[in-house]
Amino acid sequence: MEPREFFIEDRLERFRLNAFCNLGESGLAHFLLEEVMDMAQISWKDLAKIPMNDSPNQGSLALREAVAALYPGVRPEQVLITTGTGEALYLAFHVALPPKAKAALIWPAFQALYEIPKMLGAEIIQVPHERAFLASTWKEIQADLYIINHPHNPTGKTFSESEWNSLLTHFKEQKKKVLFDEHYRFLPGAGSLGRTGVDPIHSLYGTGSFTKCFGVTGLRVGWLVAEESFLKRARSFKDYLTHTVSPISERMALGLLKSKESFLPKIQTRVRENIRMFDSVWKDLPHTKSFTAPAGGLVGWLELESGISSEVYADKLFEKTGVFVLPGINFEEEGYLRIGFGEREERMKEGLLRWRACTDLI
Ligand SMILES: Cc1ncc(COP(=O)(O)O)c(C=O)c1O
């Protein structure tokens, strides 16, 4: 079996490097290597001394310790370092899903979250985002695996404190198997680190990364957190795929995690300011209908007036203004645009001015 085309990728490949204002990506605008080294407090001399052997298959102990410290009660033995969250998800689905499994997830979704389970023969239960952030919704669903992406891509939604507590209690009491995709955990709506549902002894597993939130997607580092026997199987599977992660990426990742308090508040301020800016102008953008400001993460879901093709809208917008957004149809949902909030503030401001002035879009 082979997964279908990854619908967002064609457009991302075409526009992400040449858009004047990039609201199409779900990551923070990238930093340069010299900036990343500064953030990670690594000198050129440190870089030059990195031994270029294979990293340990599970990831270096120092990096696994730094990742484990992000989760209450998690030990480094329960962490597997992977090539991006994409690989962590791929491995987790292969190990977690029995034949003919049922997998429930919030809809619409980042395609890998359902395309890989589908490829493995799973039946997908789509849980509409309008109801998915209520614990009661999940209590009615019988599935072999619950896939919870929070803050959510593409809507930017997340759970309230009371719904979250009720959801976790339910999953634990009913001994459910859950995979939390917490890719945007470093960008909560408020505070410095978002909540996690990961609790390996209760089969609540998770994938994570900081690459989108820190503006370093090119590092290609992610992780899987799970109980040891699950993790051992995932590691063995990984030996056939990427095997190990580059020691350069691992060293940078360690430096970034250790010194995140020195640069993350500035990033969080930028993203929150971009969201505030967009929320104050979206009603003036042509043919838009509704928008709820994201409660966390880097993306939001803008509804268009009915009958408009999201693809035509996105194409015309790029052509006329250089503003790049992703059409909802790439998430298999017509009538929406996904808006990213990781662009530099000045470009975001200018992009929105151009978009607003573009009255002949449709
Ligand atoms: C929710 C979610 N999970 C996983 C991924 C894959 O991340 P990575 O680039 O680390 O492979 C993405 C990327 O956009 C995402 O949005």
Image (cartoon, rainbow, N blue to C red):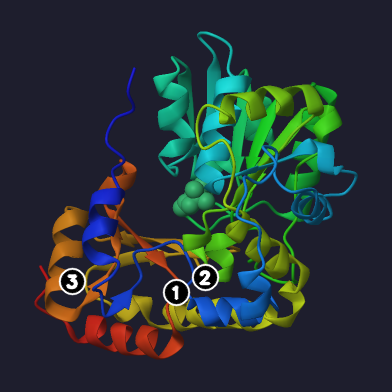
**According to the image, label 2 marks what residue?**
215
Q: Type of residue at label 3?
A: Leu
Q: Could you say whether the residue bearing mark 3 is in a helix, strand or loop?
A: helix
Report whether the residue tagged 2 is closer than 8 Å to ligand 1: no
Look at the image and tell me in which quarter the C terminus lies: bottom left
Q: Give the side of residue 174 with respect to residue 84, left or right.
A: right
**Label 1 or label 3, whichever comes before in sequence order:** 1
Q: Which mark is residue 317?
A: 3
Report whether the residue tagged 1 is closer than 8 Å to ligand 1: no
Q: Is residue 276 visible?
A: yes
Q: Type of residue at label 1?
A: Ala
Q: Could you say whether the residue bearing mark 1 is in a helix, strand or loop?
A: loop
Look at the image and tell me in which quarter the N terminus lies: top left
Q: Are marks 1 and 2 in contact (CB under 8 Å)?
A: yes
The answer to which of 308 and 269 lies nearer the viewer is 269
Q: Give the side of residue 335 with respect to residue 189, left or right.
A: left
Residue 12, image quadrant? bottom left
Eye-nearest disc, 1 or 3: 1
Instruction: Name which residue lies at 24% across and 80% down.
Output: 355
Q: Could you say whether the residue bearing mark 2 is in a helix, strand or loop?
A: loop
Instruction: Name which residue lies at 56% across and 35% down.
Output: 243
Measured Cα–Cα span from mark 1 to mark 2:
6 Å
The answer to which of 148 and 290 lies nearer the viewer is 148
Q: Which mark is residue 29?
A: 1
Q: Give how far across and how far down residue 41 sits, in percent.
A: 70, 79
- The 10 Å Cα crowd at callout 2, few under 14, some 14 to 19, many 20 or more, is some
Measured Cα–Cα span from mark 1 to mark 3:
20 Å
**Label 1 or label 2, whichever comes before in sequence order:** 1
Instruction: Name which residue lies at 30% across and 50% down.
Output: 9
Q: Give how far across and how far down residue 216 sits, in percent.
A: 52, 67
**Label 3 or label 2, whichever comes before in sequence order:** 2
